Structures are given as structure tokens and as C-alpha cells.
């Protein structure tokens, strides 16, 4: 069946890509810790992991009182490389604007820890990791994980680092879900919490977009039923399509219009063909292609699934207010143009927190940046977070 | 390379599907007319078609004065089978609620014509059609077509049927774009126009979603560079993913929430797997699979591209008001929860029409139905259209 559209045979580049992906999953370019069968890790699915590796990055220094630690929870396609050059792409960290000396999350004052999430592909146990017992790549053999599982792995990391209570847990999108889960399930470990652009449960529309992405990945014959790394290939086209669809949901209609409008790409007239005539098309294709270089397709399946399953209230008789206690101070942040996690979702969280008697600040930031605004240059967000953290630190006696 | 995810060999069902698709494209289950090289059809791309076939459906009877004809323009994935059983799916017509005896578009009073669009796959010349000269399937050999090309083909059909001026041209979504194009380019042929849930130009976000769909189709190895019908296959997975992504954009967040919420599909607990755990997932998968049975993937590429290129103002010095004259009476309809073609787009059209001195009614209908509301049971839309048409008919002396 040799036709022009049969996938190309894995060439040199693809082999390099596969090798780098496997290397980063097993021997990450950041600190990591391994737990063995003496400390089995129980999952929400009822299964357990006899081997757990957690990769993480840190910035700044832990103070003597161990009271200045801030945990950053990354989003679906993020990782622990918050403020350093990314080991695969060479690009600056995804939150370099937020984290660093003199930045809103000031590493001169705080000790920042960002773990790669469970199910991820940058060194924490995930589908691309090799099982130390069998020497085989986990692939779909890894049990499904939940947001609560991710957070329990992070609690274990804090235990390992000797940190009893984080000064703050901060994150946007899937990171924000983890923040809510931290505060809900481990309130004694969280002094303050900053959930950004997130919700307490994944909506039907959110699940729908994720399902499209998963189907795009699984429709790619190079996915090989999830065994692509074993077979030395990667479902690049499918994952690129998934990323393209998702990327649209991260931006607002207005920001797409402002950024691209109907502008043509390096041409004066449309070509009357299927090339990327419009700038928005080449932009999206670029997003797809670059994503594939740094992300594992099975991880994408696992993490989207974890988000779909997320529904904090479900574990508390359907009442979100029951999910929270009053221990933690909250700063909830949403963005006006975020249609993936609209402000309404944050308001529901805020109402529940107030009902639970927690201390809550809530800021809805006016921006056209869409869901991705939490990654962008949003001065009001920076000021809000810097101010809230500083107050929390002072209250806790952090100098 | 035999692995579990290699596409299955074309089996009996696929052959039947391919044969039916080809039959419907060339010998449709509806009236059709063929034009030969003596009447070449010029396209916006500068190319021309020496053979043009137009398939269409009619309902009701043309009156003696030939003054009661209503042209219905169908949407991206619609066709001419407005109010009769669909020849491929056996389902009722897509606008059976709107068109028929005693219905808002009353076939006891009006003569309804719905042509399959140029580039379609139900009998009007499109990529799935066989070129009568070469005996080959057009595939990507067909030049790209525009909304203006589609409308010019429809004008030719009206000439053929001896109808000088339509009482009304009506359509939603891509159908609405055609309505605007009719009124703009052929004002002397249109007594009244009802553009629904559409806009005068495709937005950046609209183009983005279409590009995702096209990439999903073209990523499917069974697309075979567009030659799948020649090779007896169909890019079913890719087209299903494209449809799934598009379908989300046709519904509102609220309607998805009301219809599906986070309800599980025939189970009490999530399976911790990648099956369709949530009802929204099985619903979307079903949408994908059923679409593939009735629609041609290359047609999907051509028609999405035609929509992307649509920008009426661009041909009139960038001023939308210059695109319209005062001849035609307009009734513009939009829906509050339509985020694909938001009301704002309709307002821009209304403003331009007012500037042009045209007579305009504008109705924004309160509904959670999203973009697809024009296909749903929306009594206010029915009343609006019935009333507007009746007034137009009376004005024109149609009994």
C-alpha cells in the first residue's frame, strides 16, 4: 500500500526525537527523586505504582524556618522548567515573567518548587517512562491518574524535601485545579492558595474539546495503539491536530482577531489552494509542529483525562463548599476573555470558599488574552499575586 | 508494518460506502441539470469549468407569474434534501421543521428550490464528481470555489428554471453567506433576503477551527493525497475528528451542559480508561461516525475553504455598506448563544444595510441552542420568517 500519503519511515530526526523524549522521561534535566516498592503509591483508580519518580525544579533558597516554600503547579502542557531554559526547546521557561529575582514570585524571598506532574513526560512517572522493574516503556500500561493523584505525589515530594507546609501553592488552568485539590485535600499543608483561570470541575465543553484531541492522537496510525516509542515512532500529525484545536480554546476571539485578523501569510492574494494562506493558519500549524517536538502523545491522553475526571464537589456530596476548610487563605484569579474557564467558574469557587468560611480575595482581570492570559504579560495579575504573596509571607513571619 | 492501529483494509462496507458516494455525486437522487463546454463556467480563481452539474430539490409549485420562488441555501454540511428523506441516511430533511405545507416556509404558497452547492458532494459538481470528459474523479483537480461561485451557479439554475427574480433567498451559516452574496452581487434577482446566523466575513477564529478540521482530514493516511475514492477508501477517522471539533462550535457551552453535563455513559463510575466515559464523548463520537457516512472529505476541504475566503467588504474597498444596494428587503436573524457567528457579526451587516438605504428587520433570538439554533425548534425564528415572507409575498402580489 505505498501511496504518497503513507507515513514516512522513521528517519534520523525521528530517532533523535524518540531518544530525547525517552531520555528526558527517565533521566530528566532537573533534580528528581525515586521511590521504590517499599513505599508503594496508591492511585484513585485503586491500582498502585511500585515505582514512582518525581522530577522537579527549584529556584531560590529554603529559609531556616522552612516557611518560604511556594509550590507551582504547571498546566496540561507545561512542565517543571518554569524559569530556566527548556532542555528540549532551548526556549525560556513558561513563567519566566512571574518567577525570578525581583519578579512577582520573588526568588530572593521565596523558595520555589515546581514538580513535573504525575503522568507527565519530563521526568515524573508517566506513560513515556521506563518501568524500572521490567525495563519496558509504560505506555498505556500505566494506570490512569487523577488530579488528586498528582497532588498526592507532590505532597510526597514536600515530605521528601522536609517541608511541612507550603507558604503558597500557585497555578493556572490544570495547575489551578491542582491548587484547589491541594487546599481541599491537604489544608494543613497549604498556608495560602492561588488558583488561576481554572474551575472546580471540568465542563461538558471542556471534556468535548479534550475528546477531540484524544481522538486525533489515536486516529494517527503512528500512535500504534500507544506503543509508538517501542516502535521508534511518534504520532506527530495526530498530536499536532490535537494541539491546534486546543490552542484555539486558549485564545480569545478578540485576540485572534487583533493578532491575525484575515491577514494573508507572505502573499497579496489567496492562492486558491490548501496552503496556509492566512496568518492564523501558519501560526496554528507552527503551534502544532513545535508542540510535538517537546511533548509525549500518551501523556497528552493521560493528562487530558485527569482534567476531565476532575470534579471536587463530587467527592463531597455534590456540595463544593463542603470540599474546603477555613485553614487556607485564597486568592482566586480569572480573566474576562477566558471562555475555556470562564469567570463564572471562578465565582462558583469563591462562593464555596466564602460558605466554608475561608479568607478569599477574588480578582477578575480585564484582558483580551483569553485563557492563556495567565502566561502573558498581565501587570494586574503580577501585582495581585505579588501583593497577596507578600501579605501571606509577612503574616507567616517570612522576611 | 502490521500493527494493531494500521488502518483496516477496505472491506465490503467501505466499498459500498465509496460506491454510494460516487453514485450520489454523479447521478444524484434529486433533479439535476448539466451544462456543457458551450456554456463554460468562470470561477473566481480565474479557472473555468467546462462541465457543470447542478443538483437541486424543489417543493411546492411555481405560480403562473413565476413570482413565488424561494431559494434555500444550505450550510457547510447540508444539502438539497431540505424536507425529504435523505437518500444516504434515511433521516428526515435538515429543515423539515421550516419547509412544508403549513410550515413557516409554506410550500402551499411558495415554490422552494434548494440547490446543492458547487463543491458539494450530493450531485452538484464537486471533488467527488466524475469529470465527464476524462471519466476521472475530480478530487483535488477541481479548482477551488468561492461563495460567489456557488451563488453564480445558483443564478444559472434560476435562469434554467425560468425564474427571473426569487421572492426570497434564505439560509443559515454558510447558507447565510450565500444569501448575503446573492443580495450583494445579484440584487435584481432577489426580492427579499433572510441571512441567518452568519457574517459578511469569516473571522480569524472561524478560519482557525476550519484549518484544524482540514489538517485532521489531511493527516489521515487514508486521505491518500485526496485520491481516496480512486483507491477505494475514505479518510474516515480524520473526517470524524474534523466533524467532532466543528460540532462543538455549533453548540453553546450552556446547551452542552444542559444536555450532557458531566453525566457518565451507561455506567456508575468512570472506567479509568480512554473509553467514552462521559455522555458528551459518545455523543461526539457518534456525530463523527455518522457524518462520515454521508459526506465527502474533499468536499469538506473545499467548502471550509470557500467560507474562509468569504469577505464581502474586501471586494468593495473594505466598506461593507458599499456591498449592498437598496433593492432588497432584508430580515437578519442571529442567536444570543451563537459564539461561532456572534450577534455582533449580524449587527455589522445590519449597520451596513442601513447605511446602504436598504429595508432591514433584525431579530436576535434568545436561545441556548448555539449556532445550530437555526436547525432547531425555535418558535420565534419560525414566526419571524413566516411573517416576513408573508409580508414580502403580499407586497409582491403572491397569493
Image: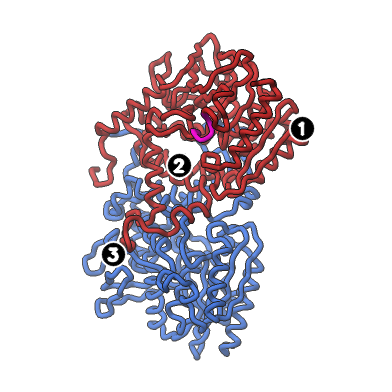
Chain colours: A red, B blue
Q: Secondary structure at mark 3?
A: loop
Give the answer, above or below, for where B25 lies relative to A96.
below
Q: CA distance from mark 1 to mark 2?
A: 39 Å
Residue ID for mark 2: A215
Q: Which residues are magenta?
A: A95-100
Query: Disc 1 is attached to a residue of which chain?
Result: A
- Label 3 or label 2, whichever lies nearer to me, is 2
Residues marked 1 and 2, same chain: yes
Q: CA distance from mark 3 to mark 2?
A: 32 Å
Query: Disc 3 is attached to a residue of which chain?
Result: B
Q: Which residue is nearer to you in this view: B155 or A119?
A: A119
Q: Quadrant of the N terminus of chain A?
A: top left
- Label 1 or label 3, whichever lies nearer to me, is 1
Q: Secondary structure at mark 1?
A: loop
Residue ID for mark 1: A356
**In the figure, is residue A177 to the left or right of A25?**
right
Q: Do tag 3 and tag 2 residues touch (Cβ < 8 Å)?
A: no
**Residue B26's x, y, as percent?**
33, 66
Q: CA distance from mark 1 to mark 3?
A: 68 Å
Give the answer, above or below, for where A204 lies relative to A228.
below
Q: Which numbered disc flags the more N-terminal residue, 1 or 2?
A: 2
Query: Disc 2 is attached to a residue of which chain?
Result: A
Amino acid at each position: 500500500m505505498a501511496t504518497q500519503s503513507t507515513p514516512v519511515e522513521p528517519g534520523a530526526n525521528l530517532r533523535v526525537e524518540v531518544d530525547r523524549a525517552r531520555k528526558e522521561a527517565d533521566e530528566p534535566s532537573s533534580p528528581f527523586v525515586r521511590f521504590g516498592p517499599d513505599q508503594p503509591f496508591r492511585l484513585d483508580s485503586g491500582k498502585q505504582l511500585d515505582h514512582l519518580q518525581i522530577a522537579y525544579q527549584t529556584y531560590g533558597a529554603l529559609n531556616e524556618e522552612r516557611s518560604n516554600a511556594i509550590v507551582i503547579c504547571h498546566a496540561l502542557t507545561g512542565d517543571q522548567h518554569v524559569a530556566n531554559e527548556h532542555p528540549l526547546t532551548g526556549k525560556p521557561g513558561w513563567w519566566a515573567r512571574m518567577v525570578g529575582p525581583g519578579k512577582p514570585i520573588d526568588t530572593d524571598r521565596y523558595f520555589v518548587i515546581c514538580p513535573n506532574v504525575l503522568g507527565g513526560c519530563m521526568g515524573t512517572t508517566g506513560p513515556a517512562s521506563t518501568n524500572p522493574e521490567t525495563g519496558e516503556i509504560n505506555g498505556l500500561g500505566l494506570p490512569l491518574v487523577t488530579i488528586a493523584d498528582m497532588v498526592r505525589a507532590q505532597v510526597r515530594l514536600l515530605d521528601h524535601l522536609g517541608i511541612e507546609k507550603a507558604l503558597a501553592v500557585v497555578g493556572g488552568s490544570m495547575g489551578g485545579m491542582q491548587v484547589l485539590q491541594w487546599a481541599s485535600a491537604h489544608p494543613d499543608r497549604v498556608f495560602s492558595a492561588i488558583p488561576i483561570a481554572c474551575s472546580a470541575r471540568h465542563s461538558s465543553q471542556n471534556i468535548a474539546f479534550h475528546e477531540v484531541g484524544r481522538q486525533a492522537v489515536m486516529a494517527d496510525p503512528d500512535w500504534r495503539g500507544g506503543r509508538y516509542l517501542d516502535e521508534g515512532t511518534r504520532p506527530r500529525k495526530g498530536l499536532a491536530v490535537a494541539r491546534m484545536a486546543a490552542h484555539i480554546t486558549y485564545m480569545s476571539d478578540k485576540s485572534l482577531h487583533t493578532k491575525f485578523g484575515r491577514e494573508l501569510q507572505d502573499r497579496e492574494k489567496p492562492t486558491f489552494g490548501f496552503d496556509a494562506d492566512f496568518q492564523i493558519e501558519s501560526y496554528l500549524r507552527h503551534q502544532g509542529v513545535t508542540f510535538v517536538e517537546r511533548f509525549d502523545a500518551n501523556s497528552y491522553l493521560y493528562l487530558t483525562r485527569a482534567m476531565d475526571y476532575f470534579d471536587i464537589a463530587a467527592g463531597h456530596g455534590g456540595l463544593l463548599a463542603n470540599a474546603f476548610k477555613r485553614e487556607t487563605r485564597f486568592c482566586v484569579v480569572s480573566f474576562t476573555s477566558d471562555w475555556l474557564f470562564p469567570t463564572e467558574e471562578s465565582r462558583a469557587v469563591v462562593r464555596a470558599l466564602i460558605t466554608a468560611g475561608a479568607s478569599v480575595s477574588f480578582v477578575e482581570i480585564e484582558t483580551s488574552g483569553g485563557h492563556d492570559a495567565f502566561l502573558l504579560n498581565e501587570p494586574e495579575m503580577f501585582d495581585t499575586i505579588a501583593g497577596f504573596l507578600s501579605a501571606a509571607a509577612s503574616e507567616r513571619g517570612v522576611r
